[in-house]
Each structure stands twice: as C-alpha cells, then as structure tokens.
Amino acid sequence: MQVKLEEIIQSIYLLPEQVLEEVLGNFKHLEYPKNHYLLKPGKSCKHIWFMTKGAVRYYYTNEQGKEMNTWFSMDRQVIADTSSLVKKEPSEESIQLLEDSEMYAIEYTSLQTLIQKHHAFSLWYIKLVELYYIAQIEDRLTDLQFLDAKQRYQKLLSLYPDITNRISLGNIASYLNITQETLSRIRAGKI
C-alpha cells in the first residue's frame, strides 16, 4: 500500500487544511533506483526527504576506506543530514538508497519560509525534530553505550521486522558496530 505524503505530515502534528495545502505544494515527488545517492561527502544537504517506499543507509567512510553505517531509514521515515542541513556545511556522510525508492523532498529554504509564515507549521517542525532527531539520536547513543550486540540486534529487529530481507547482513553488522561473523553467531543463537 502506497503511503501518502499527507498521511506522513499529519502523523507528525495535525495542520489546518489551508496550511497543509500550502505545505504539500512545496514538496516534489521523486523516484530513484537502488544505489542512488541522495547525498555524498563534500556536498551540502539542502533537502529533507520523506520516504514513502524504500530503504536508505547513512554511512561514513574512514581514512582506510572502510564504510561504517550509522543509520537506516525505511518506509514512512524522514531522511536528512541534519548537521549539514542546519549548519549549511558540506556533509561528511553518504546517504545511499538500498532499494528502488519513492519519496517527497522539500528544500530547507522552503521549510524556513513556511516556519516563519505559519505558527502551526512551526509547531509541526518542532514535533518533527523531537520525534525524528532528538529521540532517535538519544536512543541510538543509549543503545551503543548500554546494550550488548545481541540486544542491539533484537531492538533493530523490533523496529524493522523485515530488515534482514531488505538490507545486507554486512550493512546491518556495520550499523550494530560488530563484525559480520558476530552477527552470524547472534542469528544462529550461539551468542
């Protein structure tokens, strides 16, 4: 079932109909193939994307050329490099699609205009930041600090029950900050 942009927006914070119509008019529908990059290092993030279908990974590449996954976003989620977006600086991470994907994008400048124009949209934006950035980042930091590898994997499965069918085990292991061998042992019940 295709998720509508209006459903995603209204699930964050209900906007009055007139404001909602103007907000929807600022989004552009996009479709990209698997492996497309929404953002590469050195480029500034200028959009927020609302995924309606697909999967994406965020990753850094260290000096030795090793990719380290830091985040996944899937259906009905928000995508952005918030640090690059807000600071208007080049990104240090890559955002790559892991599946053929559909999404809606809004430019950060349009977002700022809507915030200044509509109080209700300002409240919506605050709720967006609370739900998709502050809470998720706090959870991620807490998980890495206090959960063992098996607990982190179980939590990931509870958030994304079909993740192992959609994202490679190598990418999952990198996100969990473990080796692929350790992930295999966890999956086999040996840990």
Image: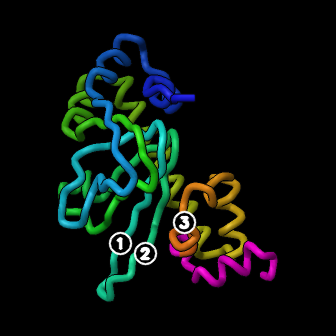
Residue at (28, 21) in percent of width and height? 25
Is 186 left, or right, of 104 in this rendering? Answer: right
Residue at (73, 76) in percent of width and height? 186
Amino acid type assigned to the residue bearing label 2 in the image: Met
- On whether residue 182 falls in the magenta region, the answer is yes
Q: Nearer the viewer, mark 1 or mark 3?
A: 3
Quarter of the image that includes the C terminus: bottom right
Circles 1 and 2: CB distance less than 8 Å?
yes
Q: Position of residue 73 (x, y in %)?
A: 48, 52
Magenta extent: 174-191
Crowding near pointer 1: few (<14 within 10 Å), some, many (20+)?
some
Q: Residue furthest top?
A: 18
Main SS, magenta region, reads helix
Amino acid type assigned to the residue bearing label 1 in the image: Tyr
Disc assigned to residue 168: 3
Q: Which residue is the site of mark 2?
A: 68
Q: Which residue is the site of mark 1?
A: 60
Quarter of the image that includes the N terminus: top right
- Label 3 sits on a secondary structure element that is loop
Q: Is residue 36 above or below residue 12?
A: below
Residue at (32, 31) in percent of width and height? 29
Q: Nearer the viewer, mark 3 or mark 2?
A: 3
Amino acid type assigned to the residue bearing label 3 in the image: Ser
- Label 1 sits on a secondary structure element that is strand
